[in-house]
Image (cartoon, rainbow, N blue to C red):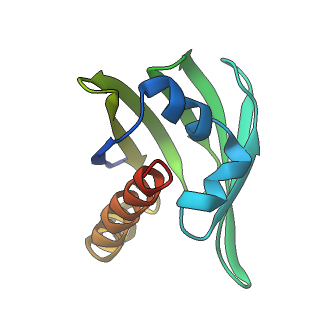
Amino acid sequence: MSRVAVHAAVDVDATAQQVWDVLVDWPRHGEWVPFTTAEGGAAEGERVEAWTGIGPAVFLDTMVIEDWRPPTRVTVRHTGWPIRGEGRFDLLDLPGGRCRVTWSELVELPLGVAGRLGWIGAGPFVRLMLHTALRRLAKLFE
């Protein structure tokens, strides 16, 4: 199985704790992650579910929290289809009451060669979505 890594980062005008409180409030993901609603737990081993899409083109992304370190890291294992792999948010306090948020995904591509070819088109879109989501998250603190 092929894996690809993608990540995005943004500096936010808030502390890591302030951002953490929004970041892991899963129902609030709809405020900053485009086309997504989510719900879930707040500890290692708990589940998170996110629905992403528009109209009838919606898919369910099931996850399990594997690492929970408030307010600096949350890691999830994507357990569904078509999304499998690992997602992680890292928060780092910066001087002046700011923080850097990094969103990383290690995606296990499905469908062999077809999945690798599909990533050629989907990869730039996924990168754009991560960057867009993090910019929207930062705007919540302006």
Q: What is the total number of numbered labels drawn onto the structure image?
A: 0
- The answer to which image quadrant residue 96 occupies is top left
16 sits left or right of 69 in the view: left
On the image, which quarter does residue 91 sit in? top left
Looking at this view, name the residue that lies furthest to the bottom: 55
Q: Is residue 78 above or below residue 76?
A: below
Question: Which x, y percent locates residue 59?
Answer: 67, 66
Taking depth in this image into account, of 105 and 134 the one nearest to the observer is 134
- Dividing the picture into quadrants, the one containing residue 132 is bottom left
Residue 41: horizontal and vertical position, in percent? 75, 30
Can the viewer see residue 49? no
Residue drawn 66% across the image and 17% down it: 44
Viewer can see residue 52? yes
**Residue 76 screen position, x and y as percent:** 55, 32
Residue shown at 30%/77% (left/top)? 121
Is 141 left or right of 90, judged from the image as shown? right
Residue lying at 39% horizontally and 44% vertically, measured from the top left: 105
Seen in the picture, residue 100 relative to 93 is either above or below; the reply is below
Residues 140 and 29: in front is 140
Decide: is 36 above or below 6.
below
Q: Report the residue at 47% width, 47% height from top.
A: 141
**Coordinates of residue 127 in the picture (x, y in percent):** 31, 62
